[in-house]
Amino acid sequence: MEQYLEFASRHVFLVGGFVIVAVLLVYSYIAPRFRPWKTVSPLDATQLINREDALVLDVREDSEYQHGHIVNSLHIPLSLIDKRMGELEKHKSRPIIVGCRTGSRSGHVCGMLTKNGFEKVFNLGGGIMAWEGANLPLSKR
């Protein structure tokens, strides 16, 4: 035990860096379990759309959306989500799948939706890139 303490005292930055990385790694596995929304795969998203009439909310910017989007998705860019939150009120009883390019921006919007009282909120894991990777169709209209 003395050797560990001696090593730690001589290599404070190395040990500190290790502790930080370990804490972040544990957090990355534990944090999703406590979020009020769930992450779904493209396959699970299609099942929600087909079986529960889920609304797909695309929060990408206009140029990204025009390159291809999920059919019948509602497009509200992340930069306008606060101003246009009222448009979503009529869909509060439906499951809402939020998607962006990779799934990171949509996670932020999922948090906003749950804070505004939406109960069935899902993040499209991997975003539209995962949707394309699963060979699911995109519309350009």
Image (spheres, helix red, strand yellow):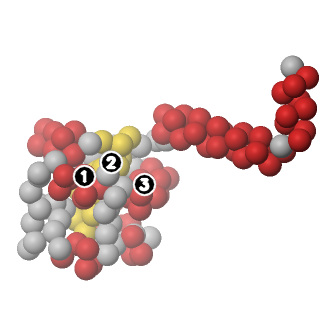
Q: Nearer the viewer, mark 2 or mark 1?
A: 1
- C-beta proximity under 8 Å, tags 3 and 1: no
**CA separation in Å, label 3 and label 1:** 15 Å
Locate residue 49 relative to residue 59 in the image: left or right: left
Q: Does residue 111 appear left or right of residue 130 in this picture?
A: right
Q: Quadrant of the C terminus?
A: bottom left
Residue pointed to by mark 1 = 130
Q: Could you tell me residue 35's position as x and y percent?
A: 49, 41
Kindly report the distance in space between the C-alpha atoms of the residues bearing marks 3 and 2.
Answer: 9 Å
**Dot 1 alpha-carbon crowd within 10 angstroms: few under 14, some 14 to 19, many 20 or more:** some
Q: Quadrant of residue 43?
A: top left
- Amino acid identity at mark 3: Gly
Query: Within 10 Å of the Cα at label 3, are there few (<14), some (14-19), or many (20+) other Cα atoms?
Result: many
Residue in the picture at 17% in, 65% down = 69
| Closest to the observer, 75 or 128 | 128
Could you tell me which quadrant the N terminus lies in? top right
Residue 37, label in figure: none
> What percent of the width, then of the height, locates residue 48?
19, 41
Which of 56 and 13 lies nearest the eye of the viewer? Answer: 13
Of the numbered discs 2 and 1, the one sitting upstream in the chain is 2
Q: Are marks 3 and 2 in contact (CB under 8 Å)?
A: no
Residue position for label 3: 107
91 to 47, vertically: above or below? below
Q: Which x, y percent locates residue 97? A: 28, 51
State the residue at coordinates (83%, 43%).
Answer: 11
Q: Quadrant of residue 8?
A: top right
Q: Residue at x 16, y 60 (%)?
A: 70
Identity, as a three-letter code, of the amino acid under mark 1: Ala
Mark 2–mark 1 contact, CB under 8 Å? yes
Q: Secondary structure at mark 2?
A: loop
Question: Quick check: can you spot residue 113?
Answer: no
Secondary structure under the numbered disc 1 in the rendered image? helix
